[in-house]
Image: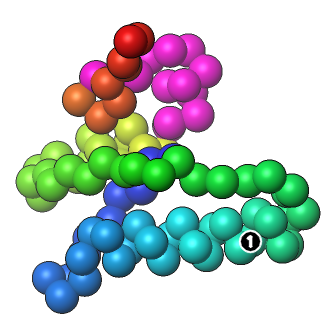
Amino acid sequence: MHMLARLHPSVSVARLVGEVKGASSHLVTHDLGVAFFRWQSGYGAFTISTEDVPAVERYVLNQKQHHAFGALEPTFEPVDWS
């Protein structure tokens, strides 16, 4: 999952990720009835300039296509084949 967010300085990335993972896990398991859903343990976070927001927004909105065609952006999604 990719997400573009603007955070207030008082909100940590860890808090945002924890709340997103918690709320979405509850939704998937309780409301959608998926039995064995679990997030991976880690996450990545990047800071970007205001000028880069439109390009990153396009990337996030089109992530399903990127994954379907293997057209991943190495900066955002490095492939580790080890």
Q: Is residue 20 above or below residue 59?
A: below
What colour scheme governs how the chains and residues are painted in the rendered image of this protein?
Answer: rainbow
Judged left or right of residue 23, residue 59 is: left
- Compare residues 38 and 73 and report the one nearer the observer: 38
Q: Residue at x 38, y 42 (%)?
A: 58
Q: How many numbered badges does the structure rendering display?
A: 1
Image quarter of residue 81 = top left
Outermost residue toward the right in this view: 33
Residue 71 coordinates in the image, percent (x, y) = 44, 17
Residue 26 coordinates in the image, percent (x, y) = 71, 73
Q: Please check the rendered image and state whether residue 35 is part of the magenta-colored stretch, yes or no.
A: no
Residue pointed to by mark 1: 27
- Compare residues 76 and 61 and report the one nearer the observer: 76
Q: Please check the rendered image and state whether residue 68 is part of the magenta-colored stretch, yes or no.
A: yes
Q: Residue at x 61, y 21 (%)?
A: 68
**Dot 1 amino acid type:** Leu
Q: Find numbered disc 1 in the image and state the secondary structure of the residue it sits on.
A: helix
In the image, which residues are magenta? 62-74
Q: Residue at x 26, y 53 (%)?
A: 45
Residue 75 coordinates in the image, percent (x, y) = 23, 29
Residue 66 coordinates in the image, percent (x, y) = 50, 25
Alpha-carbon neighbours of circle 1 within 10 Å: few (<14), some, or many (≥20)?
A: few
Judged left or right of residue 77, residue 30 is: right
Q: Is residue 28 above or below residue 56?
A: below
Judged left or right of residue 3, residue 64 is: right
Outermost residue toward the bottom in this view: 10
Q: Is residue 1 above or below residue 3?
A: above
Image quarter of residue 4 = bottom left
Quarter containing the C terminus = top left
